[in-house]
């Protein structure tokens, strides 16, 4: 690994903490019914600009950056990895963002993030 591309472990910890705090705030808001956390697509946007929740968009960007940095350092961040995995769920069988957010919050509270879900059982 190139020493010029490394990040101080303390900085990585701070970045992880900032991400976790912002994620929890957004998950709570999403669990209460707001859409747009797991996807840029927001069909019911009042603003009409397609970017109804800028904090959620920044959270996804932060998750990608944190994922890249943490994987480069050899210590993956389970919270950002699982969040980004949930952002890829689309289609007819999608459980809906509020339900997905409540499920993810439950997994975080139970300390299950970073552990595999039951085989054959959807995480929501």
Image: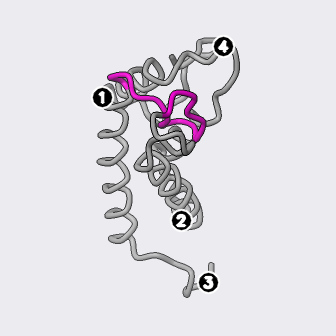
Determine which of the numbered discs, if any, sits on residue 84 in the image: none
CA gap between label 3 and label 2 equals 13 Å
Q: Which mark sits nearer the N-terminus, 1 or 4? A: 4
CA gap between label 3 and label 1 equals 37 Å
Determine which of the numbered discs, if any, sits on residue 109 in the image: 1
Q: Which mark sits nearer the N-terminus, 4 or 3? A: 3
Instruction: Identify whether 23 is placed above or below 119.
Output: below
Determine which of the numbered discs, if any, sits on residue 93 in the image: 4
71 inside magenta stretch? no
- Mark 3 neighbour class, 10 Å CA radius: few under 14, some 14 to 19, many 20 or more: few
Give the labeled residue for mark 3.
2
41 inside magenta stretch? yes
Q: Which region of the structure is painted magenta? A: 31-45
CA gap between label 1 and label 4 equals 25 Å
Q: Which mark sits nearer the N-terminus, 1 or 2? A: 2
Confirm or deny contact between disc 1 and disc 4 (CB under 8 A).
no
Image point 31% across, 31% down: which residue? 28
The secondary structure type at the circle numbered 3 is loop
Which secondary structure class fits the magenta region best?
A: loop
Q: Is residue 89 left or right of residue 23?
A: right
| Foreground disc of the pair 3, 1 | 1
Q: Nearer the viewer, residue 80 or 54?
A: 54
Determine which of the numbered discs, if any, sits on residue 69 in the image: 2
The secondary structure type at the circle numbered 1 is helix
Q: Which mark sits nearer the N-terminus, 3 or 2? A: 3
Image point 53% across, 65% down: which residue? 69
């Amino acid at each position: 690994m190139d020493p010029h591309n490394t990040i101080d472990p303390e900085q990585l910890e701070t970045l992880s903490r900032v991400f976790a705090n912002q994620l929890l705030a957004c998950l709570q808001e999403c669990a209460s019914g707001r859409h747009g956390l797991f996807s840029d697509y927001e069909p019911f946007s009042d603003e009409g600009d397609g970017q109804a929740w800028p904090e959620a968009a920044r959270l996804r960007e932060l998750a990608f950056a944190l994922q890249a940095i943490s994987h480069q350092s050899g210590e993956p961040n389970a919270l950002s990895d699982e969040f980004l995995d949930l952002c890829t769920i689309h289609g007819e069988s999608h459980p809906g963002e509020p339900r997905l957010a409540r499920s993810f919050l439950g997994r975080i509270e139970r300390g299950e993030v970073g552990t595999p879900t039951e085989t054959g059982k959807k995480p929501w």
